[in-house]
Image (tube, rainbow, N blue to C red):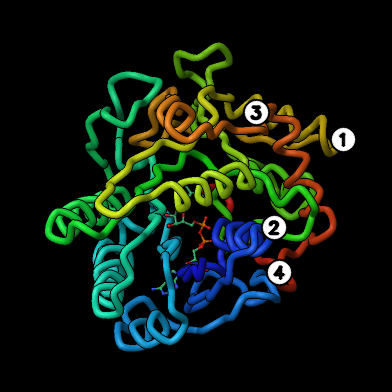
């Protein structure tokens, strides 16, 4: 298939591009590089520095490259930033998706796999979270993604040959098992890279937000799904989509690890003492969040291969220790402490 990948220079998108190419697909990456890295784009993928807002450029590319499917990863994805800049988030993530859909409409491209998020569930009353759990986002980032899910449903209802899948990721972690790709966000807010940056001495300490939750060790429990597994799910979904379908899947491993367990895993994997500081709870952080991923297992046979936290952290460490400054030199990570 010919696949357009908006956001293919980012963490997850670059891993998906690699897998698509290895599976024999032809890939065209579009990314404005606001958060991504040119070096992360697979050498066999065509790369175009294009913003999601540029509908004419996207339309031309979709036509010229005879694209069959769009795998849409491009977004801004910091919860805190979305609270202070909601318009920026709705503009980039929601209006950006509309622009992309308009381009697809004009070019007659009828299939999309969309990066959604468990942030669309907000603070659910029950875990594990199933796809029918009510979606009540609690921040503009979650709403900006929820809006795209809504728009996709309405667009699909009006265009019955269009098909899409919204994949609701939990916490994506790890790096390509072969060490070729990594995770490099600026600032870095995700737990696994932060503990590894602390192990490398690039971060003074990892701040744990709340150690008084009703969990066995008092810290929050989250579902960490390996990026390679996540990308495999994307390809399985893309292959399965038939005209007129709207599919929704949770992507997680179906169990959670506590923040403390991730820190302990990083200590074992790196052999370093991870400096830790304890701070107050953050508003809107539920004690326990993990996915029920039975639906995609039942329907497509997808199941996460990496479920052991030490192994997941080890794949990330493999990349971080060989790329201590990520894709750039040098990394200014200390300023991000506590975010
Ligand atoms: N990382 C996670 O744990 C996680 C969890 C749930 C959902 N997601 C979603 O997965 C997707 C990828 O996340 P990531 O962690 O790889 O983020 P990332 O920031 O590494 O990648 C996003 C990419 O999109 C590009 N981009 C953003 N806005 C753009 C625009 N207007 N035009 C063109 N390119 C643009 C950025 O330059 C970047 O390369 C996002 O949609 C995110 O919301 C991620």
- Asked whether the residues under the numbered discs 1 and 3 touch, taking CB atoms below 8 Å apart as contact, a structural biologist would say no
Quick check: 202 above or below 330? above
Q: Position of residue 269 (x, y in %)?
A: 82, 35
Q: How far apart in space, not on screen, are marks 3 and 2 (Cα)?
A: 19 Å
Q: Could you classify mark 3 by the number of other residues whose Cα lies within 10 Å: few (under 14), some (14-19), or many (20 or more)?
A: some
Marks 1, 3: nearer the viewer: 3
3 or 2: tag closer to the N-terminus: 2
Q: Position of residue 254 (x, y in %)?
A: 51, 24
Which mark identifies residue 102? none
Marks 4, 3: nearer the viewer: 3
Looking at this rendering, what residue extends furthest in the left direction? 158
For label 1, being within 8 Å of ligand 1 is answered no
- Asked whether the residues under the numbered discs 2 and 4 touch, taking CB atoms below 8 Å apart as contact, a structural biologist would say yes
Q: Secondary structure at mark 3?
A: loop
The residue tagged 2 is 182
The residue tagged 3 is 307
The residue tagged 1 is 271
Q: Is residue 36 left or right of residue 107?
A: right
The residue tagged 4 is 327
């Amino acid at each position: 298939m010919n696949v357009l990948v908006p956001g293919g220079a980012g963490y997850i998108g670059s891993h998906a591009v690699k897998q698509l190419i290895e599976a024999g697909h032809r890939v065209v990456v579009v990314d404005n590089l606001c958060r991504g890295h040119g070096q992360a784009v697979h050498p066999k993928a065509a790369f175009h520095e294009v913003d999601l807002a540029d509908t004419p450029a996207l339309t031309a590319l979709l036509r010229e490259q005879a694209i069959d499917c769009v795998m849409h990863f491009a977004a801004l994805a910091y919860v805190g930033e979305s609270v202070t800049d909601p318009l920026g988030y709705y503009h980039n993530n929601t209006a950006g998706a509309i622009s992309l859909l308009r381009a697809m409409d004009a070019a007659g491209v009828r299939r999309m796999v969309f990066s959604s998020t468990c942030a669309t569930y907000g603070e659910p009353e029950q875990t594990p979270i199933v796809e029918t759990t009510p979606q009540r986002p609690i921040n503009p980032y979650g709403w900006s993604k929820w809006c795209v899910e809504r728009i996709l449903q309405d667009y699909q209802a009006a265009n019955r040959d269009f098909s899409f899948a919204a994949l609701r990721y939990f916490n994506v972690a790890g790096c390509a098992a072969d060490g070729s790709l990594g995770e490099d966000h600026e600032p870095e807010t995700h737990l696994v890279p932060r503990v590894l940056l602390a192990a490398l001495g690039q971060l003074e300490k990892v701040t744990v937000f709340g150690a008084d939750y009703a969990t066995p060790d008092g810290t929050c429990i989250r579902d960490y799904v390996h990026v390679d597994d996540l990308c495999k799910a994307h390809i399985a979904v893309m292959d399965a989509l038939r005209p007129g379908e709207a599919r929704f899947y949770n992507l997680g491993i179906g169990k959670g690890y506590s923040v403390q367990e991730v820190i302990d895993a990083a200590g074992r994997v790196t052999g370093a003492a991870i400096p830790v500081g304890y701070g107050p709870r953050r508003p809107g952080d539920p004690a326990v969040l993990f996915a029920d991923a039975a639906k995609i297992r039942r329907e497509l046979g997808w199941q996460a291969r990496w479920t052991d936290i030490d192994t997941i952290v080890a794949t990330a460490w493999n990349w971080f220790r060989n790329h201590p400054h990520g894709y750039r030199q040098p990394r200014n990570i200390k300023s991000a402490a506590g975010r």
